[in-house]
Amino acid sequence: MITSVNNPSVKNVIALRKKGKLRREQDVFLVEGPKMVAEIPDGYLKEMYISEEFDIEQHKMLLKGRAYELVSARVFREMSDTQSPQGVLAVVRQRHSTLEGLLAAQKSHILILEDVQDPGNLGTMFRTGEGAGVTGVVLSKGCVDLYNPKVIRSTMGSVYRVPFVYTEDLHKTIQRIKKSCKIYAAHLQGVYDYDKADYTDDSAILIGNESKGLTKETAEMADIWVKIPMQGRVESLNAAVAASILMYEVYRQRR
C-alpha cells in the first residue's frame, strides 16, 4: 500500500489533476469513480489507483483483469479532485480526432464552440451532444480544457465517445466546415426562430462565450442566425441550455 504523498506516482497524479500543460505533455487525463472507470475504452487505461476504503469485493468485475495500486485513504484524498472521493481513480490516455474525420460522417451534426469557459457547461454540451447524435465538437483554443477534472465529471463518460478537435485558428476551421455543412449561429438577433430552420442536411451549430456570445467576426461567418424565442424578461439562456435546445432540434428533424 502506498502511504506517502511523496510517492512519485502519487505526486504525478496530483500534478496531473492541477496542470493542463502536464496533461498535454503526458497525453493523459484523470477520471474518478466506478462508472467513469468502468467505461474506459479498451487500450486507454494507463494506471489505476484504489483507496484502502474501496469495497473490492463489491467491485470485483470492475477490477477484473486490471492492474492497480492500493493507496491509503489519506493519500487518496490528496489525489482526488472531489470532496467525497469514490475510492477509484485512473490515468487514461487521451483520444485524438481530426477535423476531416469529424466531417466524414454520413450526415454531419457538428457543434462549434467559441471560447466556452465554464467546465460544467462544456461537460454538459458533450453529454447532451452524445444524446442528440452530434458527430463531433470543434473547440476554439480559448475554450476551457476538456480534460479539466470538472469537465470530465460533467461529461458522464461522453468524453470517451464524442469525437472532438481543438483548433488554433477557428475562422480557418469554420471556412473548411462551410464547404461541407450549413452553419447556424445561435444569436440574439437571429433571423429565424431556431425551429423554423432546416437542419436535415449536413449542419453545424455555432455557440459563443457564456457572457459575450459569439464575436462579430465569427458570427458573420455563419450562413444563418437563429434565435430561441423567450417570454418574460429573460434576455438569453445558459450556453449549455441553448446548445442543447439546438442540438435536439437537429435530432428531432432528422427523426
Image: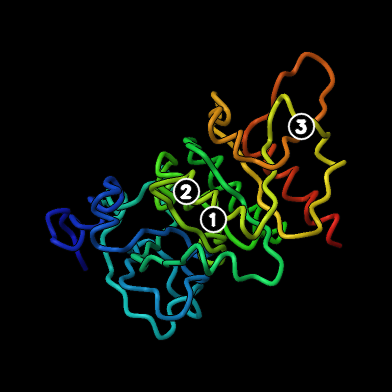
Which residue corresponds to mark 1? 176
Q: Residue at x 42, y 59 (%)?
A: 31
Tell me the tag on residue 128: none
Task: State the SS at label 1.
Answer: helix
Task: State the SS at label 2.
Answer: helix
Displayed quadrant of residue 129: bottom right
- Judge whether 17 appears above or below 236 on screen: below
Q: Residue at x 47, y 45 (%)?
A: 170
Figure colour scheme: rainbow
| Labels 2 & 1 near each other (Cβ < 8 A) | yes
| Labels 1 & 3 near each other (Cβ < 8 A) | no
Instruction: Choose mark 3 or mark 2, whichever is in front.
Output: 2
Residue 17: x and y in percent read 31, 50
> Which one is in front, 24 or 19?
24
In the picture as drawn, the residue positioned furthest to the top comes out as 233
Displayed quadrant of residue 162: bottom right
Q: Residues within 10 Å of mark 2 (few under 14, many from 20)?
A: few
> Which one is in front, 159 or 87?
159
Quadrant housing the C terminus? bottom right
Residue type at mark 3?
Lys
- Judge whether 64 appears above or below 9 on screen: below
Task: State the SS at label 3.
Answer: strand
Which residue corresponds to mark 2? 172
